[in-house]
Image (spheres, helix red, strand yellow):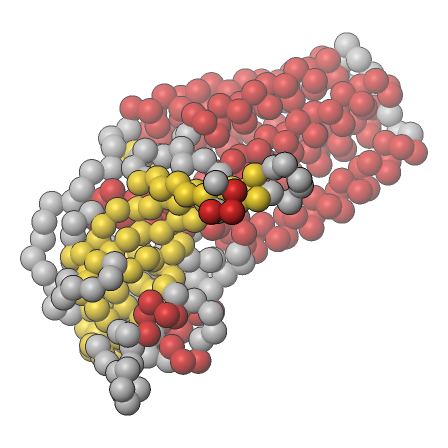
Amino acid sequence: MRRATVLTRLCGGAALVAVTVAVGLALVRHDAPTPRWDIIEALGVAALAAGGWILACRAAPTVRVESPVPAQASIPRSLRQPPHDWGLAAGVVLTIVTPLAVLRFGFALYEGALTGLAVIVGIGLGFWLLVYVVTDLLGHRLGPRQRVLCTDAAAGQVHAVRVRIGAPIWKRYEKRGDKPGTIKAEHTHWLEVSPVGGGVPLQVYPMYPAGGGTGLTRTTTDLLQAGLQLGSHQAWVCLPTRWKLIEEGLPVALVADTGHVVWGELSRDAARQYLADPVNGAPVNLHPTSPDHPSLALAGRAKFRQDLHGRQLVWLLAAFALAAPALLGAVAGFPGSLLCLGTAVAVAASGLGVTRRAGELPGEIGWTVRESRDPAIR
């Protein structure tokens, strides 16, 4: 894993802006005469900027373990929320909007009934996905359960336990598949932390974002970064005082002595011993929070992954190859409209492929991978 730098942000931002310009031209000037050199030039700039982004990401400094710091006896009253991932949000939105722009451009080439139906269905589905993703990525950065913990910390008290941060774990569990003769793999991620006073290590699982879904990959990578950047550091595991009013997993804020805050979840069974006395049920491990102790978010990451973005690049090159004859005016009418439909499918497939594979492959160096299999199929 590598840190984001000024160069990675500039190149990545330039690529997104150039693609936005190309998509905007396709939408606003969809009926302009071909060849469409304006769109081709914008896509060329995007390709150059994307190449610079890849090189900048590969040259960025790696995430290293922070230097040891003195133990912190206090817990921040204001727990830092995860920052918005504007680059991810822009990339996902463009992946949805680009096929819509291509379909609109194709409809201008051939205004047949079939093409019109494809445009209407594509725009309706794309608009629904766009609203969902924007709500997911740009809405609340914390879900309702995590906001309970924030409120409790702001009120002055939380349950807290001192731990030592351990390794980020990626577990692959194989079991019988849904179809006869097949095997299905389940993937689970967590950050292992060990209570300083002794006891069974705790498994901090990824936090499900407010909107669920898309942001889960980001919160999973937060745990990986915490293990790489804060490994062997001591921290406070903070839990809400109103934990009895929360169903399912309990929200947890891992507050390192460096001030960095990492959000996750603990199972109720694992957390219960640190919340209530097993004999009389009285609250235990209550600690006050302090307004004088600042909290920090983890540093930004350089997001290029060859195993993910390499495949995406192939899909995008195929999309441009399909669109090029229509943009140059070499193919018009119904054939040109079909090429635009293929382009839209290729762009959508590039985004779906990244989303699916990000949850299946431990592509980032740093995970401790554990594999096991259902005894019934051994």
Residue with the most extreme left position = 70
- Name the one closer to the observer, 22 or 75: 75
**Side (left or right) of 166 relative to 353:** left
Q: Residue at x 29, y 24 (%)?
A: 59
- Name the one closer to the observer, 56 or 45: 56
Q: Based on the displayed image, in which of its 4 quarters is residue 113 positioned?
A: top right
- Name the one closer to the observer, 199 or 295: 199
Q: Quadrant of the N terminus?
A: top left
User: How many numbered marks, from 0 up?
Assistant: 0
- Give coordinates of residue 225: x percent, y percent: 30, 44
The vertical placement of 6 against 318, above or below, is: below
**Side (left or right) of 331 relative to 67:** right
- Give coordinates of residue 188: x percent, y percent: 43, 49
Q: Based on the displayed image, in which of its 4 quarters is residue 121 positioned?
A: top right
Q: Residue at x 89, y 29 (%)?
A: 111
- Name the one closer to the observer, 44 or 229: 229
Residue with the most extreme top position = 330
- Give coordinates of residue 219: x percent, y percent: 40, 51
Q: Is residue 171 visible?
A: yes
Residue with the most extreme bottom position = 280
Q: Residue at x 23, y 71 (%)?
A: 160
Q: Residue at x 30, y 86 (%)?
A: 281
- Give coordinates of residue 183: x percent, y percent: 56, 39
Q: Is residue 91 visible?
A: no
